[in-house]
Amino acid sequence: MTSPVLVAYASRAGSTAGVAEAVGRSLTAHGLPVEVRHVSEVQDVTQYRAVVVGSAIRIDRWLPEAMDFIQRHRADLAQRPTAAFLVCMALGLASTPQQRVQAEKSADGYMQPIRDLLHPASEGMFGGALKVSAIKEPHWRLAFSVIVGLRVWREADYRNWEAIQRPGGAGMSRVEMWALRGVLIALALYGVFLGLDFGWGGIAGLGWQGATDFLTITEAARYGVQDSHFRFLGGVFAALSVFIGVGTTDLRRYRDSLRLAFALIFIGGLARLTVGDATVLSHPDVVVALVFETVVMGALYVWVGRSARD
């Protein structure tokens, strides 16, 4: 019999327990035997093929019982695939792009102590649910009653069930995240290379991509104007590539901007088709460029979008 996957959780008002149950159902739907248990009920993790551990966030920290579970079983967890998720209200309450960026940054900080201990293969960060009557601690129930009464927050379920039940959680594994960063860094370096070649070399380029003696200039002044425009575009492309490199430092923060950059390059690739000359469009260099600017940019648009799903 195949050993099961453990989904262990720590919850205060039931919101995280609900997330754990949903994660368990998603794994079961993919043919895996699963046990969903509170961390206090788990004495041994060696019987499980993999472990998913999650916690609610209180005062910017994982719950003590969740941290105790990780500390007690740290050695055994290191021997098997382990994933982690957290549930915090900040992710659910963020209503503007700026608030979302700040909430994701905060959640990322809440996950860092777990990364230091476990190096999880996959992570999930989800909004929670606010129901005052479900809060057990009197002081917290009073505090949230006041907040709701003042209409600062409202009672609602802010959990994104589609993201929670999606295989891989809210985004991608850390291995895939680093792979994406590597691809983007390589793209940025190549883009800077191209941008500098034409930004400094103009239409003829600096010769970094081959011979530059393919031009015969008949009107120097007119050529100079077009060459100036070409240098400008080369500089823009170099700057855009530098930005893509900067974006790898925080994919959640720069996600939308990176996707806009890929969309612009995609549109630029489509503009090549306006030449209307099949001989030019079928040239190997142009075919490679078109595939890169349309297919690759489209794939990166989707891939970066997965890096920080709600």
Image (cartoon, grey):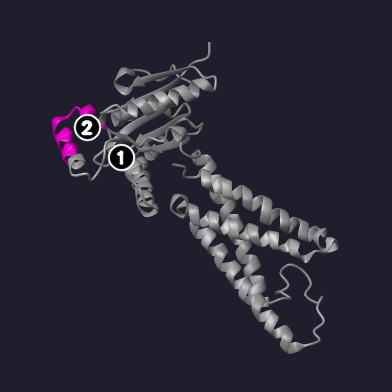
Mark 2, other Cα within 10 Å: few <14 / some 14–19 / many ≥20:
some
User: Would you say residue 135 sits in the magenta stretch?
Assistant: yes
Q: Residues under labels 2 and 1: Cα distance? A: 13 Å
Q: Is residue 97 above or below residue 238?
A: above
Which residue is the site of mark 1? 89
Residue 227 vs residue 127, the one in the foreground? 127
Q: Residue at x 39, y 51 (%)?
A: 101
User: Would you say residue 17 sits in the magenta stretch?
Assistant: no
Which segment is the magenta one?
131-146
Which residue is the site of mark 2? 132
Q: Residue at x 80, y 64 (%)?
A: 276
Q: Position of residue 183 (x, y in %)?
A: 59, 51
Rendered image quadrant of residue 76:
top left
Quadrant showing the C terminus = top left
Q: Residue at x 84, y 60 (%)?
A: 278
Hey, what amino acid is under mark 1? Met
Instruction: Answer with left or right where residue 95 lies relative to residue 142.
Output: right
Residue furthest top in the image: 1
